[in-house]
Image (tube, coloured by chain):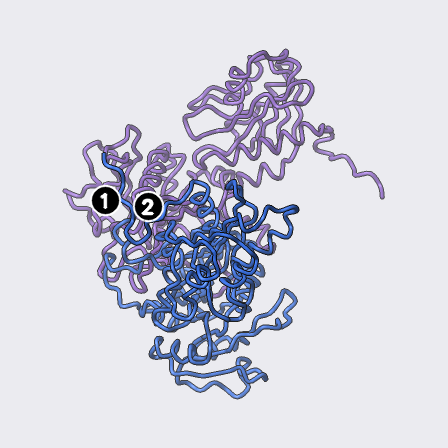
Chain colours: A blue, B purple
Amino acid sequence: MSAPAASAAFPTAFSPAETHAMQVALDAARQGPRGANPLVGAVVLDPSGEILSVGHHRGAGTPHAEVDALAGLRAHGPLPELSACTMVVTLEPCNHHGRTGPCAAAIADAGIGAVVYAAADPTAEAAGGAAYLADAGVAVRGGLSAEQALELNQRWFRARAEGRPFTTLHIAQTLDGLIAAADGTSQWITGEAARLDSHGIRARVDAIVAGTGTVLADNPRLTARDAGGRELERQPLRVVLGRRGVPEDAAVRGTDGRFLQLDGRDPAAVLGELAARGAGHVMIEGGATVAGAFLAADLVDELVLYLAPLMLGTGTRSTGDLGIASLADASRWRWDPAGPARPLGADLRLTLEPLPLARHNERP
Amino acid sequence: MSAPAASAAFPTAFSPAETHAMQVALDAARQGPRGANPLVGAVVLDPSGEILSVGHHRGAGTPHAEVDALAGLRAHGPLPELSACTMVVTLEPCNHHGRTGPCAAAIADAGIGAVVYAAADPTAEAAGGAAYLADAGVAVRGGLSAEQALELNQRWFRARAEGRPFTTLHIAQTLDGLIAAADGTSQWITGEAARLDSHGIRARVDAIVAGTGTVLADNPRLTARDAGGRELERQPLRVVLGRRGVPEDAAVRGTDGRFLQLDGRDPAAVLGELAARGAGHVMIEGGATVAGAFLAADLVDELVLYLAPLMLGTGTRSTGDLGIASLADASRWRWDPAGPARPLGADLRLTLEPLPLARHNERP
């Protein structure tokens, strides 16, 4: 057996401590919510390779993983000289001013001596962090566990590459895949805990889309509310898709001006319009026609499926026609790496993402 | 505040050690498979209240929980005098010769000095164990955590009271509740691990029922097979429901004579016929018509739902009409107390039982 060849792109060797720290950082990254920002984790190692701090990104508008890990150092007590410490991070530190400052500068300013990252940031506006760090005298190496890091955010990178928001499809259905009974009753399929969880998603997204059918049938407000029914401070743009008229007194119109109606026939055009309005994360609320249109266009990046322990037999299905005739052409998904299922009251929350195309032949 | 009144039915007090041991026994019971026998757990306590052994029933034909707990004592090393020990068991020890000997006699013969049980055995053929033990000089007390123990086996007791086998409905479906694509393709919705798990159920049951539609469409063998496709030693009776003819060369007929066709219009009559043939546990394999008929008749005691991470949009639904028009009348279930979901390869196995009627207003 010959020794494995060094990677041409990343000839650098990594220590066992750095390799282990990267797995810890990847695990931390998986705890974050998917959305407008990628999942990122970061670990600070002392000169002996011990972990001083672990950070991860907790959603748009909150500190990036690197800053979170630096903040964690403060709770640590006496610290070694940071110039002798290494930060291990799953994505090349960003170099842009978004809602937060650039991480590359934060790392250099903190005096961290070395950075190991997994994957280069492929987005034009955030790239350049490694070069910034090197210029600032930080020893930078990349490529450790790069494939895992890229796969962790495969759908986020794809959304970015397509210049569109990251999308989360929300479905609340019975065990037999129905979102309303035969007589149209649908409130409530799921219990309070699941509904509160979905309001948490509403509060994180920039826009929420629903079809005119849902709006006319249920007259939903599409606002993010707390357990007491009070509207939260941060509210998504409320977007109704379809050409049917939305009544003047429809609850979805609200009074804050954050309401929009779009022709929903082309989901990609809808996302383009929302991207132009600054949306980084869009929640697809339903119903079946809208869900089916986004699924058929492969424009769903995350699926949050609340499964109520009910059976109805007949009623409204959760998804419309996806243009799939045969099992071999089924839309394929995989469970979220942070865990497939989580009980919420009497219901179960399932979280999935589309199976990367390269994995289509790998089902066990 | 007045002191709580002593129970008229069970005036006996229980020690904290016995109360704790009963919870351990209930937890152990939940690990067993549901089927022809009730879920039962047993714990042996030493005179100081320490747990010496925990046992549970692992399925028809295997030792009962009490015998399992006694067997566990052998691995324990030096033991105290058993006449000073107490066995804590979730169900009154049985007094009948089934596939195994009576537990009451096994406990008395082992020399156990005292027995605490939760619920009396309400089945005529197994009852009388407490009286046998008392006659044998064992100090017997009942009623500790009786409600929990009865609820654990609520559907089993109900099946017994109705003089019918316990039933397990098996469904392997996509996320959107389909068991076949629009063109009829259905092999395989789930992966190997899930299929192997369902063959494990086949090997435990006495009979497996499927509709003529499934038999004509898929030509299944309905046998229990191992990972290599070889037939296991224990095979269920293969029962086809429906009036359409089953072809002479249909795989389900097999060559062992363990094949039966019944008119499936009355699920209760089907179960009555199978009870008369000695079946204690019946697996309902499908398809949608048969599943729907048993669900609509409230004759499903356990639901094993394999959920494949696929979406099809259009195809064959997993259940037929249940006669439910409105959400308020939905068929209500609860997750198995041993856990709602278990990954099996790329799929997820969900296990549920019907929500007891008394709990219908308790959804969180």
Most distant residue in the left direction: B249
Q: Is residue A130 above or below residue A86?
A: below
Is residue B323 in sight in this rendering?
A: no
Q: Chain of mark 2?
A: B
Residue B83: tell me if it is visible: yes
Residue type of the residue flagged with mark 2: Glu
Q: Earlier in the sequence, mark 1 or mark 2?
A: 1
Q: Position of residue A135 (x, y in %)?
A: 45, 62
Residue under circle 2?
B285
Neighbour tally class for label 2: few under 14, some 14-19, many 20 plus, Cα within 10 Å = many
User: Do the dots labelled 1 and 2 sit on one chain?
Assistant: yes
Count of marks overlaid on the render: 2
Please name the residue shown 22% across and 49% down the image: B218
Position of the N terminus of chain B by quadrant: top right
Tell me the chain of label 1. B
Q: Measured from the top left, where is residue B348 in percent x and y?
A: 40, 48
Pointer 1 residue: B220
Occupied quadrant, residue B320: bottom left
Under circle 1, the secondary element is loop
Label 2 secondary element:
strand
Front residue (pair A196, A233): A233
In the visual, does B276 lie left or right of B52? left
- Amino acid carrying label 1: it is Pro
Front residue of this view, candidates A1 and B169: A1
From the viewer's side, name the closer residue of B230 and A81. Answer: A81
Mark 1 and mark 2 in contact? Answer it, CB < 8 Å: yes
